[in-house]
Image: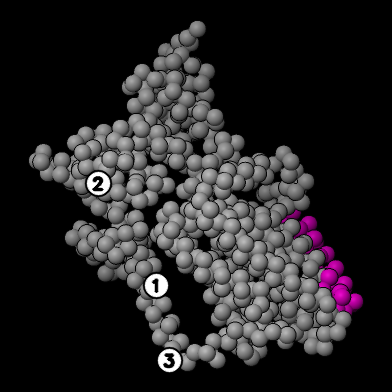
Amino acid sequence: MTFAALALTGTGIWIIVTSATGDVPSLNLAVAWVVMAMPFAYLATVTTSRDDSTWSASLSLINTIALMVMFLGIVDFLLLRTRPFSVFQDVNVLAAFCNVFALPAIARLHEKFRSEGTAAALKSGTAGFLLITLTCLAATASRGGHLSFAFGMLALGALLIRHDRKAWKTVAASLLLFVALLAAIAPFQKHAGSLSRLASMESDQSTSDRMEMLKSTWRMVEDGPWHGSGLGTYKIRYLMYRSPDERSTSGDLAHNDYLQMLAEGGPVLLGLILLLALGVGMSALRLWRSAGSAADSPRFIESAGLVGALFCLFGHAALNFIFYVMPLAMIAGLYLGRVDSLRTDVRTVDLYRYLSRPMLLTLLGALGLWLTATLGLQSAYHAMTTGKCELRLCTSLAGDEKFFGKFSALLAATQPSYLPAREWFVNAYTATANSATDDAKRIESARLAAKELSDQIREFPALPYTYRDLASLIVKHPEAAAAVADTVPTDPTALLSESVRRNPLDTTARTLLAQRLDAAGKTEAAFALLFDDGMRWWKVAALPDSGRANLLKGAIPLAIKLGRCKDAQEMAEGLAVFLPKDPLAVPATDCVTHS
């Protein structure tokens, strides 16, 4: 069994075994299937590409889709003259996507130079495909993407030149083409290029934020369970450890897959991913040793191109999120499987030797039914409750509370870790309590909502919003506190404090807590909570404009009350950016500075 087969088998087993032990199992399950795209793609490749025709047909389809994606990235750049965000909603992901197709294309182009001559190679579809790939890569201006491209080219170039000394011409021409494309698009772009961004790394805010994020993630690792908090929980737990100096990222992903997998999957998952990276390195070493005597040049060159692309991915994973993006995880699995399939010194796994076709169909059918009963029902519920389903059936059921009640009850009973269904009951109970005219019905509904929130806090203590919702419920319906479990606090101030501790960016919880502190005579603490508290909260780029405006609207009256007129004026000017017509956006004239 190869390194890749061993590592991916262990990865799949570990993810499945630990999917129910994380902080939020529903998130664990959803993200697990993203990461599992790599083992599944590997298994599909080594079991179905027993002949080259199957792989060639699959590769043609994949390259066609990739060509369309990268062409859209180029069009996006030409229209906006800025980095193409719209394709994957992240330029670093697009850069990684370009890399995994650029390196194999360079290897294929070199083979065409050898077999068909320079003129025919330059006129081939491979040359055009490479031109579009490198143009898209240049347009991203992704430092991580361009560095990982250089890293992959180092591996690919070394293998090709060792196999054929004339390959230096292909490698040099590819690098010169990429540099020429960078220079050609520079006058038209409205953003800094990757070279200038690399030169200013020491003073770059993005670099500073990434370093602070890595430090915060390491503190999260030190404070977490040995087996990790579960896939998908990073964006929840990170809020508690976020540095005040880290202001621009959303905090959803760590921008370092290895560190994030250590936080979410513990040392076992990290070890398996590192074993996989070691397998890629061993493949490169095996090709290096056989380069001089490789009789089957096309197979060697294909392997070298795939290994170079894998070098790009595993190198880029140290700078961005790669294996948490399904297309990239799937391509990694495909390439790992193909590299193993091209080997002649080992046998790859062939399920058809051990399982009959009916048995395989049965296993696949069972997997499909299980996915339908879990992720399928969850996806349908999400689409219907958020209004994203435009089918006539969905629109006809949109206002049917009885249907959603039964649907939510089904999911809550069969999949208690799927929290949106349980949140539906909280919202329904709370709405009934708020609108009830009968006092007994109001109290009963409020207590049912409080019990459900209390249960969620006990089962999933990492979720910050449950503390805030329970505090708001108890403030409005004090009788609801009687239904709260003994291990859960009932003091609204304590609940809001815990909510803010777990998610400092929750502006609603922060504003509610400041109001309670101010009412208790702790105006200084309330103002610090909204205005400063280690950073100018309303200047944090990760907060939405509505959240910043709410913080300012809460903090300006407190600044006037405390006589901090300069701060009140600064915040009024800031509020004018978001809500220019708001009365508080006009600097106060009645503010008196306290001595």
The residue carrying pointer 1 sits among few (fewer than 14), some (14 to 19) or many (20 or more) residues within 10 Å by Cα, namely: some
Is 171 part of what is drawn in magenta? yes
**Looking at the image, which residue is at 28% across and 60% down?**
412
Which disc, if any, is residue 371?
A: 1
Residue 132 shows in this picture = no
Q: Amino acid at mark 3?
A: Pro
Q: Amino acid at mark 2?
A: Lys
Q: Give the side of residue 56 with respect to residue 304, left or right.
A: left
Pointer 1 or 3: first along the chain: 3
- In this view of the protein, which residue sits in the foreground, 77 or 413? 413
Q: Secondary structure at mark 1?
A: helix
For marks 2 and 1, give the one nearer the viewer.
Answer: 2
Which disc, if any, is residue 358?
A: 3
**Up-down relation of residue 391 to residue 405 (above or below):** below
For marks 1 and 3, give the one nearer the viewer.
Answer: 3
Where residue 26 sits: x, y (%)? 40, 59
Where residue 84 sits: x, y (%)? 61, 58
Dominant SS of magenta comes to helix
Q: Give the side of residue 553 with respect to residue 130, left or right.
A: left
In the rendered structure, which segment of residues is drawn in magenta? 158-186
Pointer 3 or 2: first along the chain: 3
Q: Give the side of residue 413 with respect to residue 280, left or right.
A: left
Which disc, if any, is residue 451?
A: 2
Where residue 93 sits: x, y (%)? 61, 60
